[in-house]
Amino acid sequence: MGGSVPLGKLLGIPLRVHWSAPVLILFLGFGLAGGTLPQWVPGRSAAVYDTAGLAGAVLLTVSLLLHEAAHAVTARRAGIRVVDITVWGLGGVTRLGQAATPRTQFLVAAAGPATSLVLGGLALAGGYGAGHLLHWTLVSAVLVWAGGANLLLGLFNLVPAAPLDGGRVLLSAVWWRSGDRPRAQRVAGRSGQVAGFLMIAAGWIALTRGLGSGLWLMLVGGFVAVSATAEMRQAVILAALEDVRVADAMTAPPVTGPDWRTVEDFLATVMAGTQRPAVPVVDFDGRPSGVVERNRLLLVPASRRSELRVRDLAVPLAQCTVAAPQDELTEVLGRVAPAAQLMILVMEEGRLVGTVTGEDVMRMARRRLPDPGGGLRI
């Protein structure tokens, strides 16, 4: 997700934080400290409310992380590639590869809401104990608030609308009944579009009645509707690419460049001769060693371009998506890490024989399905 920065790892999974995440914490903290806690536990100072509000916001943010971590851990155990977890202003996003079976899809999707519901129950129980047994009224109020928020989060995510977890559950059910994953994606996507527009309408009504939460609901609804449309488009593309082999879509011979060249030389020669945003690089023996992106090279200060080697900035081969010419294209796309630049390296006997980019995929999809989805453009 653009605008996010790495922040270590969570259970061995790369963790990223979007710039909007602090806004989420401040929004939750101010709402809790300025409204909820003074009503539930009156008579405390502003500093105490602020501290408790911040603690509650951080507690809920940690709960969001655990929700996403449950998705990631379940996926990893099922053999699905987990790219990273990103926390942002509307919650969290876990980037995964595609599930191979409806059952795996269901288990990965259900893990998040199940975790939120369990955390919600534990927080409510802790709040009850803190209030009735220890008489820690403020701690109790924070825990009850966090517990209720987790229960709401778990139930909301079970709404059968992509990209919510409930939409993934719906996808797994339709996929299991029909055996047709692209059709299941279209059903879940259409449900997500409807749900998103209903959220936007409900948020607008709430705003007209003076409820500030209406704006938040409209933002969430917009995100759901846009994401659902993207998933429907993806389903159309996958349907169009059914039975297509990697060799049918690849560009050959591939444009490559030597990884031992300096950034300055590489930009002036290899990159100057192609419009592609990313280029595979090869070692002295002509074997691929990774992929380098034009934008990453351009970010290098001019004063250092004559010092740095391209290999130092390239994505190493171990982190690239590699396929054989006879592989099914949809299967390979299912294990591509979501990234700004799609680049599949097509290799045969250790040699690079071609590449498949996003443009290649779209060109093949349009060729096989000129008017996809009855007007849904790709």
Image: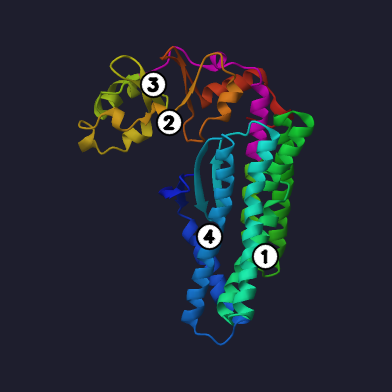
Q: Position of residue 324 (x, y in %)?
A: 51, 16
* Distance Cα–Cα, label 1 vs label 2: 46 Å
Counting residues from the start of the chain, the first of labels 4 and 2 encountered is 4
Q: Would residue 302 be found to the left or right of residue 23 on screen? A: left
Q: What residue is disc 2 on?
A: 319
- Residue at 64% over, 74% down: 128
> So how many labels did they put on this image?
4
Circles 2, 3 touching at the beta carbon (< 8 Å): no
Callout in the foreground (2, 3):
2
Callout in the foreground (1, 2):
2
Counting residues from the start of the chain, the first of labels 3 and 1 encountered is 1
Q: What residue is disc 1 on?
A: 207
- Report whether residue 95 is seen: yes
Q: What residue is disc 3 on?
A: 274
Which kind of residue does numbered mark 2 sit on? Gln
Callout in the foreground (1, 4):
4
Q: Position of residue 182 (x, y in %)?
A: 70, 30
- Disc 3 is placed on an element classified as loop
* Distance Cα–Cα, label 2 vs label 3: 23 Å
* Distance Cα–Cα, label 1 vs label 4: 25 Å
Residue 61: assigned label: 4
Q: Position of residue 86 (x, y in %)?
A: 50, 48
Which kind of residue does numbered mark 1 sit on? Leu
Callout in the foreground (3, 4):
4
Q: Is residue 2 magenta?
A: no
- Residue at 68% over, 21% down: 369
